[in-house]
Amino acid sequence: MPTLTPRDPERDGLLTRTVYPTVPPRAEWEATATARAAYDEGLAVS
């Protein structure tokens, strides 16, 4: 199921999820500061 994929990073604190009570339901995902820092570190290494 595609909805299970982002749940692990959300649990780990890398993503935040905002759900809007619309029809159909809508959710937005955003990288946290921790995820952005890890991404920057990965760019610096490569």
Image: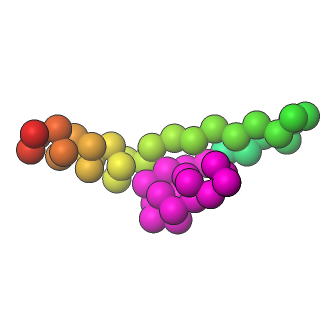
Please state which of residues 37 and 1 is positioned toward the viewer in this rendering.
1
Q: Which residues are magenta?
A: 1-17
Quadrant in the rendering for residue 40: top left
The x and y percentages for residue 45 are 9, 44
Number of disc labels: 0
Please state which of residues 30 and 42 is positioned toward the viewer in this rendering.
42
The x and y percentages for residue 4 are 62, 57
Residue at 17% across, 46% down: 41
Residue at 26% across, 50% down: 38
Residue at 64% across, 49% down: 2
Task: Report if residue 5 lies within the magenta region.
Answer: yes
The x and y percentages for residue 28 are 63, 38
Does residue 37 appear left or right of residue 46 in this picture? right
Does residue 34 appear left or right of residue 2 in this picture? left
Which image quadrant: the C terminus? top left
Does residue 24 appear left or right of residue 4 in this picture? right
Scheme of image coloration:
rainbow
The x and y percentages for residue 29 are 57, 41
Residue at 87% across, 35% down: 24
Task: Report if residue 12 lies within the magenta region.
Answer: yes
Most distant residue in the right direction: 23
Most distant residue in the left direction: 45
Most distant residue in the front direction: 1
Which image quadrant: the N terminus? bottom right
Please state which of residues 8 and 34 is positioned toward the viewer in this rendering.
8
